[in-house]
Amino acid sequence: MRRYFIFLFLILFFLPSNSEGYNNLGTSARATGMGAFVGVADEPGGVFYNPAGLSQLKNMQLSFLYAKRTKHGFAENENPYLFSGVSTFWFSKKLTVGIAGLQKGSWSEPTGIVTNNIGLVTLSYELSSKVSFGINNKFLYNSNFGKKKGYDFDLGILYHPFNKFSLGLVGEDILAEDMTNDNKVVFDYPTREMKLGFAYKVGTEKKSTLLAFDLILKEQTEPKTKHYNLYSFGLEEWFSNFGFRLGYTFGKEFGKDFGQPSFGFSLKIKGENTIRLDYSFQKYPYDNAKVTTGDHRIGLTYIFGNFKKPIFEKRPKPQKEKIQKPVFSKKKASYIPGWLRFDLNVEIENLSFDQDNLVVFFFEPKLDLDVRSWKLLFVREKPKDWKDIGDFLVKTKEGIGPLPFSLLWDLKDENFQKVEKGKYFFSLVLYDRQNQRWASDWKEFKVE
């Protein structure tokens, strides 16, 4: 794994991006509100920040964005805009695919702004449970004047060394396709670019805090080589269905001091399918007397809750009759008679919010199985025989369909009373489509 990182780092560092017209477009209201998003990229609009992040989306999603861009720096008659749409598809257990379209230009006619268009196909693949790799295939076209066509691609990596921490590395426009028109101004000079992002998230779905940092390395290639660095800090807070975020980017770009505060907020409307509405404001980053000069973005994301399986999920092969027999040794069969055993990797975290303690379980079953239903059994002592579990059972959590990636226990027993601190055990039980029962070994954890 270490060799993969070194190899990809060298590619992204020496062959990154080109042409301001196709960079820094701000295709996500959530991302622009935070300012830093390379190490996050966990939504459809994130494909333009880190294509590897798409692998985190295990369902089908649609996202649309409209940006009313500032007129500052343009002719008074111009009305600049940006529009994008992204759809994601969970193709297989490890592969997520995205299709996107984007246009940046001006509503004014006539206009002096070149209209930039992008058609994009993204492939995001999980190399392991902690590492994902992504590629954007980009079809570029200038439409109104200075017409040009081109092809380019981006590469991205997303790494989760720990549950709360992620790291992203991205290089854009690897082929350095020059899409600038013949009348170049300072902001149209070709540039090289690499982005490195970090993110740290704590909390639960209802209440969470996300901190992010991006480092952007730029090299201006004309009229003479110059190097610039930008630094971005971002904060996102979620309280139930409302999210609020702040960001700030600073440094130098094209010989000018760069300072860009931003903010945004979101509202989730939950049901069988989830709708998220986003808004963000980014101030114009160069010297300007008007505080309100900047870009306004409105975004909508639609998450299909009924797409819970990959489109091309492999169906389990018919099981032969002989596997109906226990696969346990006689010693292990003493407490799980007649059940099939599987190995389970699990990470456990103790959380505390407003004097309430919670335990979160992150599962990684080593089993390729079409799960019909599941149960998570918590006991105070590990039973010596499975038939005696009723004497030790504290809580049962169960569900229909595939096993979730994570589960939360509020440390309350079947009578809704808080359990005592100390040592506990749990076993995960799965039922497949052939009504076979699978169980993990009892695993120990502590309630703090």
Image (cartoon, rainbow, N blue to C red):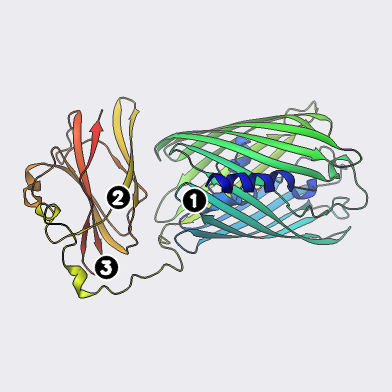
Task: Please report contact status of discs 1 and 3: CB closer than 8 Å, yes or no.
Answer: no
Q: Which residue is label 2 attached to?
A: 344
Closest to the observer, 71 or 382: 382
User: In the image, which is nearer the foreground, mark 2 or mark 3?
Assistant: 2
Type of residue at label 3? Answer: Arg
**Tally of numbered discs:** 3
Image quadrant assignment for residue 233 = top right
Closest to the observer, 7 or 252: 7
Task: Please report contact status of discs 2 and 1: CB closer than 8 Å, yes or no.
Answer: no
Q: Could you classify mark 1 by the number of other residues whose Cα lies within 10 Å: few (under 14), some (14-19), or many (20 or more)? A: many
Q: Which residue is label 3 attached to?
A: 433
Q: Could you classify mark 3 by the number of other residues whose Cα lies within 10 Å: few (under 14), some (14-19), or many (20 or more)? A: few
Residue at horizontal 71 percent and vertical 45 percent from the top: 68
Side (left or right) of 372 relative to 113: left
Quadrant where the image shows the C terminus: top left
Closest to the observer, 221 or 9: 9
Q: Secondary structure at mark 3?
A: loop
* Mark 2 and mark 1: Cα distance apart in space: 21 Å
Type of residue at label 2? Answer: Leu
Q: Which residue is label 1 attached to?
A: 56
Residue at horizontal 88 percent and vertical 40 percent from the top: 186
Residue at horizontal 8 percent and vertical 46 percent from the top: 390
Type of residue at label 1? Answer: Gln
x, y percentage for residue 287? 81, 27
Closest to the observer, 371 or 289: 371
| Label located before the other in sequence (2 or 3) | 2
